[in-house]
Image: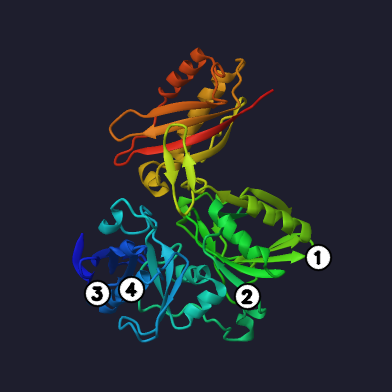
Amino acid sequence: MPVDRVELVPGGVRATVYVDRVSTGDDREEEVWVLATRGLEAVDSPEVVVAVRRDGPPPEQLFDMFRSIHDHAARGAALAAGDALEVRPGTFDLDPRISGFLCLPYRLHDPRLPLIEDLEIEGHERTPLLLVPVLDREYEAAQRYGHLRVLALLGKLTGVFPHPWWFDSRRPVVIEPEPTHPGAATLLSRYDLPTAHVPYLNVVHVGPQVRLSLSEGDCVRLHALLSDAPDTLVLLPGPGESEDARFVWRAGQTGPEAIMFATDSVVHGDLVIGVNFLVLLHGDIEVGAVHQEDGYTLMMPAELWRRFLDALADRREFSWRASGREVVLEPYPQRYVSPFGVVVESPDGYPPYRPKPRAGERTGPTVPLYNVRLDGIHLLTDQHVMEREVSADEVARLIQDACQVVDDALDGVPHRVQDMLLHFRLVPGAPSWIGLAVRPDEPEVLPQDLAEHVLARLNALPAPAVRHHEVRFEASLDVVRD
């Protein structure tokens, strides 16, 4: 519940003050002030959130900063995710060392973040921003080596994954832009390499893969950047939504190190590990993919580089083998249209769903299938809402059972189906419903009596109960043809 509301701009913008409790890395709880704006969207700016350890009254200078953010946005200079807001040291009494703020997406319904009444109101045109204070020359280090490196070091310091969303003025500085001694130099400081911040790109390491994910719309931006790029360029990406761990830098490290989500919440073989930088080299070189510090270096011969740029221009998936790894470019749409009438749109894109299993949970069919193959899962409900309502294991079990029903029904039956889509709808206090669509969408592709038999069996399956929110998702099935 809010404890105070402060008018920032008469009749337009206010800040709401909340008190929340956080668990620190040493298993203690502390109170924090959470300050959130309401009304910045009227000047084409995302709403912003700042959280600081409660040590006295709410810092008045934060309200002044909110007013400044409003004024700049009104002049056409609104903040966006991936930006950094520089301030003069000594501006904030709560910690005179504050030199700036890193701007991160405040993803609504993320269970790690507090529920904020003003932000829970539907209708946001822009994802709100979480402003994370940085100290002294951390701001400069974030500009040189990437926001993610600084945030990962904060996570390592506090034991909070992926980083603490609140500020504690008692913390030390976690990184300097210049090495304090020769052995502390990072790869990124040894060479004077051109650097580009690309917060719309997410890079992760998953088993033998390195995945580069971005929306189809942002493929155009990255293509324009790389088309005129020198033969060596450092990309500093942004955070993703489905990471289980993140690489972390340490001076003098000889191998990869990472901070992790709670170890009882992930299956180690399926870890999605966030990557903090990407060095791209192209020209007269051999193909390669090398893990270095908390990032990756990708070496691309001229022909591979051309094909990579073509894939970006065409906004299509592209992959190649390098140093025993598979590097995958994964563009995802900003709009998904379901044949069941549901349309999901997001200016940030519609990334593929990768469920986060708890220890021992499944994420896909484990019973052999002979007539169909699970091709993908599409969420029609916000992923964080879905994860609060139903576990990855329950989703996997329901999808597996449904795939088995379809697989059995198609065994030995003549049909002309090329692929199928299963639509799952879970409603609080009501029976679940599973629908079926086939392609091509033509009469008699699937015999009517067989379709009715499949639907009856699908809707007789036991489904998990949801308590607060409707949950919808779809499973795409490829049909195996002899």
Give whichever of discs 1 and 3 has the lower sequence position.
Answer: 3
Mark with earlier residue (3, 2) = 3
Q: Compute the Cα span from label 1 to label 4.
A: 50 Å
What is the spatial separation of the Cα atoms under label 2 and label 4, in whole angstroms? 36 Å
Q: Earlier in the sequence, mark 2 or mark 1?
A: 2
Q: Report which residue position mark 1 lands on.
A: 284
Image location (x, y in percent) of residue 356: 48, 48
Is tag 1's residue or tag 4's residue first in the polypeptide sequence?
4
User: What amino acid does circle 2 point to?
Assistant: Leu
Please, what is the three-letter code of the amino acid marked with disc 4? Asp
Badge 1 amino acid: Asp
Height in image: 51 above or below 333? Answer: below
Tell me where residue 63 appears, x and y as whole percent.
Answer: 27, 74
**x, y (%) of residue 60?**
25, 78
Question: Which mark, residue 71?
Answer: 4
Query: Regarding mark 1 in the picture, which secondary structure is present there?
Result: loop
At mark 3, the secondary structure is: loop
Identify the disc placed on residue 58. Answer: 3
Residue name at image x 32 percent, y 69 percent: 51
- Tell us which disc is closer to us: 1 or 3: 1
Image quadrant assignment for residue 104: bottom left
Q: CA distance from mark 2 to mark 1?
A: 22 Å
User: Is 105 displayed left or right of 287 in the figure?
Assistant: left
Q: Evaluate if marks 1 and 3 touch, with contact meaning CB atoms under 8 Å apart.
A: no
Query: What residue would you read off at disc 2?
Result: 188
Q: Give the CA distance from mark 4 to mark 3.
A: 22 Å
Marks 1 and 3, how far apart at CA: 58 Å
Q: Could you classify mark 4 by the number of other residues whose Cα lies within 10 Å: few (under 14), some (14-19), or many (20 or more)?
A: some
